[in-house]
Each structure stands twice: as structure tokens, then as C-alpha cells.
Amino acid sequence: MFPSARSTHIASNEEVLPFRVEIVARRALQEVATLRAQTYGKHLPDLAAQLGQPEPADFSRGCEVFAARSKLDGSLLGTLRTHANVYNPLPLQASIELPHRFRGTRMVETTRLCVKGGLGASTVRNALFKAMHQYCLDQNVDWMVVAARRHVDRIHDSLLFEDVKEPRVYYPMAHAGGVPHRVLSFSPSNAEQLWRTHQHPLYSFIFETHHPDIDISRAQDLNYEWQCPDGGATVTYLPERRLMPRQPTNTAVSQPMALRA
């Protein structure tokens, strides 16, 4: 995992999970799309009908698809996708103008969160959040943002996300079939202090426990100056180019790393 000036907390415990969280390989994207269609079909059937195949963003630079896969039988247990505003505006920016405080900042939006039901569903979701949070620290992201529909927004409330505009106002989201969503934000660099102050029940899981089964080393390295396009710009998903897994280094990255197709 590449270095981050913001990721300084040292885990004192280690826990082995019954699944692994990794960046999805291209060959597994159809399986991810199938899980999305099945999950969204329970609540948003019209949107689910469009999700049976991988989306352009799944192959794009600036986006990552995370997945949790069972060690027991190899089945896919959960997934989410991140969008960094390094090449394009965030998907939610097609539907809402973000306040001025977000202008010129490094942002990552989470989309297509899907977790299979069952006794371990909450642990899978927590592990995906931990992977995303670590990814944002590694990329020196200023803001994690999400558009969450009614009821799902309670999960983000519990994680101490805050509304970017008026509290508890829902906005129709073009990338979510026009369904109204709350738009919430969270500062990854402030999370450790915030959760410690509030004695958050997940504090130990996120900050005091090392999980060797959470491995995001195949993420693209975006540790260079982003262009940070504003909303309204044309979205062009650039073809996928992947970095090889990186070795730890103490050298700060100031320019884009060499990419391999």
C-alpha cells in the first residue's frame, strides 16, 4: 500500500476475516454487475434492469471497484465503486451543485454499494467502508461523499457523515434512476479524532485492528495534483490502465506514476 502523510494511526490488534476485500479484477466485473442487479432489484427494479452488465466507470481511470469475497466458497458478498474527481466531476454533481467549500478539493464518491443479506452483512459493509477510508487516506482525499436514498442514509448517519447542504433534504439523482437521495460528506483525515471523541462503536475495528484480508494494493495511485473539474463538465470515462501492486516507499509522489495497460 502506498504511503500517506495522513495515515499515521498504528493498529495494535490483528483480526482475520472470513472473507477478503480487494480491488476487483476485470474478469470479475460481470459477477459484480450481477450482484448489483440482484441487490438493486429488491428496491429499485427500474434501475436494476440497467445494471446487469458492467458500466463504463467500472473500467475507468479514477474509479475503483472494491469487492468482498468469501474464503469458504469464493462467492461475492459485497461491492462498491469509488469515483475520484481527478478526471471527471463526481456522478452526483450532475444532479446537485456542491457548496463553495468543496471547490478545488480532492473528492471521492461512493456508488453502487451492494451487500448480500445474512448474519455477516454488517461486517462485510464495515470492511468495505474501512477499505474505502484507507483508500481515501492513501490518496490524500479531502472529502468522501455519497448520495444515499432514504433508509440507506441512516447507515451514513451512523458513520457520522453530514449533509453537504440543508439537513435531511433529498435530491433526485440522475445516476440512480432519478430516485431522491441525501448528499452527505465525511472528512477521512478527521475520522480518527471524530470517532474517538464520540466513542464510536466501530473505532476499534477501523483504527485499532489490522485486517490482513483487506488489501487495496492494486489501486491506481492518484497522488499527484488533480485538476478537480467542477460540476457540469463533460464526463469522459478514460480507458482502464492498471498499476502493478506497489511496494512500500517513503518517497512522496508528486507526478503521475507510470501506468501499465
Image (spheres, rainbow, N blue to C red):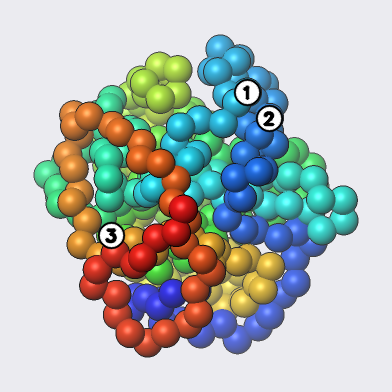
3 vs 1, front mark: 1
Q: Residues within 10 Å of mark 3 (few under 14, many from 20)?
A: many
What is the spatial separation of the Cα atoms under label 1 and label 2, in whole angstroms?
Answer: 5 Å
Residue 210 seen in the figure: yes
Residues at badges 3 and 1 in contact (C-beta under 8 Å)? no
Q: What amino acid is found at the position of numbered circle 2 in the picture?
A: Thr
Residues at badges 2 and 3 in contact (C-beta under 8 Å)? no
Dot 2: element: helix
What is the spatial separation of the Cα atoms under label 2 and label 3, in whole angstroms?
Answer: 32 Å
- The picture places residue 243, in percent across and down from the top left corner, at 47, 62
Q: What amino acid is found at the position of numbered circle 3 in the picture?
A: Asp
Of residue 183 and residue 39, the one placed in the foreground of this image is 39
Count of labels in the image: 3
Q: Which residue is mark 1?
A: 52
- The picture places residue 197, in percent across and down from the top left corner, at 41, 71
Query: Which residue lies at the image location 56% right of the left edge and 31% below the top edge?
Result: 54
Query: In the rendered view, does 173 fall on the left or right side of 131?
Result: left
Residue 34 shows which numbered tag?
2
Q: Which residue is mark 3?
A: 142
Dot 1: element: loop
What is the spatial separation of the Cα atoms under label 3 and label 1, in whole angstroms?
Answer: 32 Å
Residues at badges 1 and 2 in contact (C-beta under 8 Å)? yes
Q: What amino acid is found at the position of numbered circle 1 in the picture?
A: Gly
Query: In the rendered view, does 166 fall on the left or right side of 162?
Result: left
Q: Quadrant of residue 17?
A: bottom right
Query: Which residue lies at the image location 36% right of the left edge and 65% below the top edge?
Result: 258
